[in-house]
Image: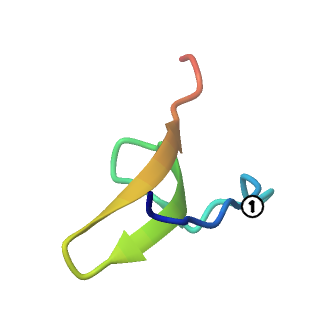
Amino acid sequence: MNSFATCSLPADPSVNAPDGSDVRVLLGLRGGGMAHFTLAPR
């Protein structure tokens, strides 16, 4: 079994996407990554 680390969802967004989504980067690796996106209602 591979070990892995956990992290908390960052309070502040890493970046804002062109559509207005808040993007919080959770993991970035050479072969891929993972992010959490939040898009507020209009």
Locate residue 18 relative to residue 38 in the image: left or right.
left
- Using the image as rendered, state which of residue 35 and residue 12 is in the foreground: 35
- Position of residue 29 measured from the top left corner of the image (x, y, whole percent): 33, 77
- Position of residue 11 measured from the top left corner of the image (x, y, whole percent): 80, 56
Q: Given the current orientation, which residue lies at the most extreme left position?
A: 31
Residue at 76% across / 56% down in the picture? 8
Residue at 19% across / 73% down in the picture? 31
- Using the image as rendered, state which of residue 40 and residue 1 is in the foreground: 1
16 vs 29: above or below: above
- The colour scheme used to paint the residues is rainbow
- Looking at the rendered image, the quarter that the N terminus falls into is bottom left
- Using the image as rendered, state which of residue 19 and residue 29 is in the foreground: 29
- Please state which amino acid type lies under the numbered disc 1: Asp
Q: What residue is pinned by disc 1?
A: 12
Residue at 54% across / 61% down in the picture? 26
Q: Local crowd at mark 1 within 10 Å, few (<14), some, or many (≥20)?
A: few
- Looking at the rendered image, the quarter that the C terminus falls into is top right
